[in-house]
Amino acid sequence: MKVFSQVLSYVFLLAVPFLVTVSAFTFGHLSYAVYLPGWFVNILFMFFAFRKLGYEKEQAIRRAVWPLIVSWALISVFAGMGPPPSTAKAWVALALEQQVRYCVLILSGVLTTVGLFRLRETLTGNSEFRYAQIGKIMILIALPLFVANMIYWGFFLTEVFIKYPSQRTLGKPGWIQTVSVSFTVVRLIEVTLLYLGTAAFAYAIKKSGKLNPTACKIYALFCILGIILNLLPGNLPEPLATANYVSYIPAITLLIPYLMAVNLLKNAK
């Protein structure tokens, strides 16, 4: 029974990001009266799953893993919020929710950073520590850019859409376009650094032997693919345009650290 409950907890935690993504893009925006209770229930289930998997693990692993788990526990609210609105009018109608969305992402980004930094402390061998240190530096540089980008999307763009609800550029100050282009560059750098830092941590974990080498290689390959897609221009034909968009969705950039955490929770001693 104990083994079954641990397997069930593991499968549930692995499934959370995929269920959240499917729900968000399938059902879109739901009433907060519907999705908030569901979100709280999901957080409760994730907490119990974390406890079940981490009960007998060493404290250092639990201490490193829980911020990474909590990051996606917070992100799971997007299952009911749906993806960001595609028009300025719809964005303005849900302005407060968009600000909450990006505040959640800021907090999740900070928690992911804390978790990865704590994970570095568990990698004591010379070779893995070196790669983890490289990952730490990249994440440390990426975090302020990530926060700035979330503020841009959650607050700056919201104010722009409120003042200029028309999609046309007529009547908008020229500096708005300049800021938009600047934050595209910020996003390119930030997402690339996040993926590079995550890949470095995946390789460090592989060197430490804490996780299956094949899994770590998959994590690293996912990060490399994310970097390539992120750097592609957004005006490419489908399906590359969609792949480019998906690669820099903030929650997706935080996915691999979460999956590494779940697998560490299952496999670490």
Image (cartoon, grey):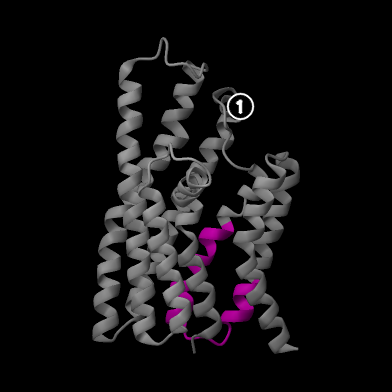
Q: Is residue 51 left or right of residue 237?
A: right
In the picture, residue 197 is in which quadrant?
bottom left
The image quarter containing residue 179 is top left
- The structure residue drawn at horizontal position 31% and vertical position 56%, both measured from the top left corner, is 193
Report x, y in % for residue 159.
46, 24
The one of 226 and 149 positioned closer to us in this rendering: 226
Badge 1 amino acid: Ala
Q: Where is 124 relative to 172, above or below?
A: below
The residue labelled by disc 1 is: 90
In the figure, is residue 27 to the left or right of 57? right
Q: Residue 102, how many percent across, how many down? A: 49, 42
Eyeballing the image, is 128 above or below 153?
below
Within 10 Å of the Cα at label 1, are there few (<14), some (14-19), or many (20+) other Cα atoms? few
Q: Magenta stretch?
A: 48-73
Question: How many marks overall?
Answer: 1
Question: For this rendering, which residue is in front, 242 or 14?
Answer: 242
Residue 112 belongs to magenta span = no
Q: Position of residue 74 (x, y in %)?
A: 56, 55
The residue positioned 35% from the left and 44% from the top of the image is 187
Measuring from the top left, give residue 204's x and y in whole percent. Answer: 33, 78
Please tell me whether the stretch drawn in magenta is mainly helix, strand or loop.
helix
Give the residue at x 46% y 58%. Answer: 254
Q: Is residue 44 left or right of residue 212?
A: right
- Which residue appears at 34% of the width and 24% of the height? 177
Residue 58 covered by magenta stretch:
yes
